[in-house]
Amino acid sequence: MKTKIKPVVFNPIGVIYSPFKDMEGMPIQPVGAKGIKGEIHLKKEYMEGLSDLEGFSHIILIYHFHLSKGYLLKVKPFLDNMKRGIFATRAPRRPNSIGLSVINLDKIEGNIIHISNVDIVNGTPLLDIKPYMPYFDKFDDEKLKIGWFEDKYKEVINKKSDMRFLQ
């Protein structure tokens, strides 16, 4: 039985601000962005949804890769010299340009959320915020596999972004 898939439209709930004006030189993951501060300016109509969030140390941000144009099914990720399937990477040139980062929640003042360990370009549209819950989101399983990334994860802390996904 085939299901007809309807288009999905998202409306940003706010904007993420960071010191990164473009992708050049930006950390490629939050683990490489230690201490980098940013802010989320949430639209005021969503402020009530921030209730109880300040009790969490980390949040998951889901956002739109607004600088990414089009998509590629094979990309050369920042940590590899081989082309890989887009769904085996976190590269921004995706069929749906959605990004995800787990970052530190420092404090909330009104509709402004102060964050740190930010690996996101300034002016990025925010789609959603979710609390990070280690009991749900972290897996300490000896059978855990991380594919082609297995011998590259130590490089992520010092690896910086370039413009490869904007061309």
Image (cartoon, helix red, strand yellow):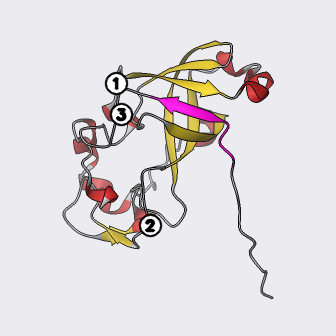
Report if the CB atoms under discs 3 and 1 are less than 8 Å apart.
Answer: yes
Identify the element where label 3 is drawn: helix
Q: Is residue 126 magenta?
A: no
Q: Quadrant of residue 36?
A: top left
**Residue highlighted by disc 2:** 70
In this rendering, position of residue 22 left or right of residue 100: left
Q: Three-letter amino acid code at disc 2?
A: Gly
**Residue highlighted by disc 3:** 31
**Residue highlighted by disc 1:** 34
How many marks do you count on the picture?
Answer: 3
Return the residue nearer the eye: 83 or 68. 68
Q: Residue at x 24, y 48 (%)?
A: 162
Q: CA distance from mark 3 to mark 1?
A: 6 Å
Front: mark 3 or 2: 2
In this rendering, position of residue 42 left or right of residue 92: right
Identify the element where label 2 is drawn: loop
Which stretch did the figure color magenta? 11-17
In the rendered structure, which disc, 1 or 2, sits on the residue that comes first in sequence? 1
Return the residue nearer the eye: 96 or 51. 96
Q: CA distance from mark 1 to mark 2?
A: 30 Å
